[in-house]
Amino acid sequence: MYVMQKSIILLFSVVALFISCTREPVKPVVNNGIFLNEVAAKGSDWLEIYNGTGASVNLSGYMIYDDPALKFTLPAITIAAGGFVILYCDGTGIGDHTSFGLSSSGETIFLEDPNGTLVDQVDYPAMSGSQSYARFPDGTGDWKLTGAPTQLATNGDGAYASLRNASRDPLVPGLADPVTISVEASDAAGLQQVKLFYRINGAAYQSVDMTASGAIYSATIPAVNSTGTVEYYIQAVNTQGLISYQPTAAPAQPYQYLLNTDALPQLFINEFMAFNATCCPDVQLGIDEFDDWIEIYNAGNTPVDVGGMYLSDSLATPFKFLIAKTNSASTTIPAKGYLIIHADEQGSQGILHANFKLNQSGEELGLFYIDGRMIDSRIFGQQIQDLSEGRSPDGSDSWFKMTPTKGSANN
């Protein structure tokens, strides 16, 4: 028994020694006037550095990292006195793009000078896409979550209220449906008010106080009972009098939903391919790309422009990919014709390239009208390499695994 206890103690000692040898020892922060000043870690990740000295500074040789074993060395970037520099944290590792990304659940970022002296660090918390974590005031102040990121500009003296996870219920309203708008609102200094602003068909905005249940604030837009567009946004004022919005670009760019009674077009998800290794390539700059793809079939007797409609790989998220309305010649499907959308997450290749891929193990696929009403859907299972799955005959209820007939009849 004594020997076993000694063995266990020895094992733990070895493990502790290994950890202490492989983890960089904690360093004291010796600041030289160069500060980590703001962090955004949800969506487009970035870090802001602030120069609190009285002179311009070349950051060449400075090192920034979230893992001591993977330090990113900054190139020759000059930051003016009292100025700001943004580092884009996308894993590229070139120029002002760091070799690491940021965790939206929170982590620690370190900044060292060229001599390896730790000049600043920040332990940032979880955040949403509408938030950043910033110093108030710049450089020397306390870190706080704010609902108004200030990239390449002063953070000011106080943090703004944080608004996130805005939602509406129902997501796709009918003309006679009241719509409940909810948002999570918080502020370290306290909230003075949270209001919902809405308007119908471009009329003047009306406002209503949002009611709190914990951190969730809600208010209702009454039933409109007519067709048209409803625009809305949320405004929060904290006890310092600072105003923040959701969406952040409001009121100039509010949320909106469409109330519509059009008859749905006779469109079908007619064929798709989710496990493509060698079939029917999408040729880009002379290179064959074997993308996932979705074929839409127009069973009607007149052409249909699908610009403004939506595709999604989640039936609960109808507005995931908007088919752009910028080129009707590309998005109009002739009567009894076909349109191919590439599910490749490569929107830079054109408007017919969706922002999602298909899961070869199976998932959902939906086609939605301009107001979010479902036109057609397919829930599919495990796919077979280089076989598609399609309706036969076109637009029917019968689905089969098949040799792909991309852009032509499945019969």
Image (cartoon, rainbow, N blue to C red):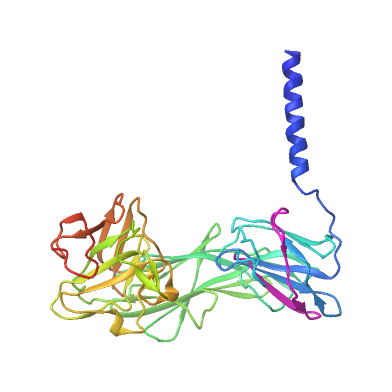
Residue furthest out toward the top: 1
Q: Residue at x 78, y 36 (%)?
A: 17
Depth check: give the residue in front, 323 or 255.
323
Can the viewer see residue 155 in this picture? no
Image spot of residue 276 (x, y percent)? 33, 59
Q: Residue 53, relative to residue 92: is it above or below?
A: below
From the viewer's perspective, is 199 left or right of 295?
right
Q: In the rendered view of the protein, which quadrant contains the C terminus?
A: bottom left
Image spot of residue 65 (x, y percent)? 71, 59
Depth check: give the residue in front, 325 or 219.
325
Q: Residue 102, relative to residue 353: is it above or below?
A: above
From the viewer's perspective, is 106 left or right of 157?
left
Instruction: Name the chief secondary structure element in magenta.
Output: loop
Depth check: give the residue in front, 17 or 364.
17
Image spot of residue 7 (x, y percent)? 74, 21
Q: Residue at x 72, y 23 (%)?
A: 8
Tell how many labels. 0
User: Is residue 174 inside the magenta stretch?
Assistant: no
Magenta span: 65-90
